[in-house]
Image (cartoon, rainbow, N blue to C red):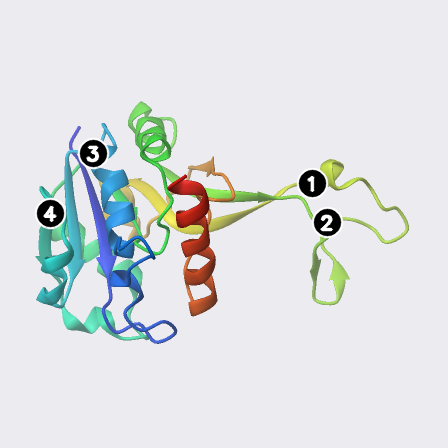
Amino acid sequence: MKTVAFVPIKMNNERTPGKNTKCFDDGTPLIHCILQSLKEAREVDEIYVYCSKEDIKGYLLPDVHYLKRDEKFDSAQADVNDMFYTFSTEVDADIYVLAHATAPFQTAGTIDEGIRIVKEGQYDSAVAVKKMQDFMWQDGKPLNYVIEHIPRTQDLKPIYIETTGLYVYTKTVIQEMRRRIGQNPYLLEVSEIEAIDINNPVDFEIANAIKMNIINR
């Protein structure tokens, strides 16, 4: 089964301009982190960076392909599912791996695990999630406990949050359902570090501290 990974890149980020190519203190551009993990993943056959601006070519690692996408996908109003579908019509594969530069610490091992799970056929997709067991509220009321009885946090019913860093799905899911998560997804639990997602300048500073003091140690 052919497995293709792709990293969609928008160069005109609104919250953190230039974040996808911004360098950590060791000189590593952010995008290199996820590309390196994808290169190390044994289950990935091809890797693409999907971007409307050819400037990104200067940041590609060896054996990573560039594919130009329509500039309409750079808009804040763009339908991202349509973008993922369009990629699947331009590059054929049995399984697609959607990864993001903003999740720099996603490991090759987790990527391979997600691919293998989908390849086995029991699940049509896999999504990276972070397990949360905290006292949560929604609409002014406790979401996962009752005020009259305060349980230990480890006894709370866990809630899983998408990290948005990694999605693995079959060709059928994206081309027939037009989405990145199928009818029967596997929740791929990742560590706190793998779950890091960079949206704003503070997130980048936290990621930089992790890169310099934990990853590079």
Spatial separation of the CA atoms under disc 2 and disc 4 = 43 Å
Q: Nearer the viewer, mark 3 or mark 4?
A: 3
Left or right: 6, with 201 as reference point: left
If you read the primary sequence from the N terminus, does the residue marked by circle 2 or circle 1 appear first?
2
Q: Nearer the viewer, mark 1 or mark 3?
A: 3
Spatial separation of the CA atoms under disc 1 and disc 3 = 35 Å
Name the residue rendered at 23%, 33% in the picture. Answer: 40
Which mark is on residue 91? 4
Q: How many residues crowd around disc 4 within 10 Å: few (fewer than 14), some, or many (20 or more)?
A: few
Name the residue rendered at 37%, 33% in the picture. Answer: 110
Name the residue rendered at 19%, 73% in the picture. Answer: 72
Q: Amino acid at mark 2?
A: Asn
Which mark is on residue 144? 2
- The residue identified by callout 3 is 44
Q: Amino acid at mark 1?
A: Lys
Given residues 184 and 18, the one toward you in this image is 18
Spatial separation of the CA atoms under disc 4 and disc 1 = 41 Å
Q: Secondary structure at mark 3?
A: loop
Q: How many residues crowd around disc 1 within 10 Å: few (fewer than 14), some, or many (20 or more)?
A: some
If you read the primary sequence from the N terminus, does the residue marked by circle 2 or circle 3 appear first?
3
Q: Amino acid at mark 4?
A: Val
Residue 144, percent across and down?
Answer: 72, 49
How many numbered circles are shown? 4
Q: Are marks 2 and 1 in contact (CB under 8 Å)?
A: yes
Residue 81, image quadrant: bottom left
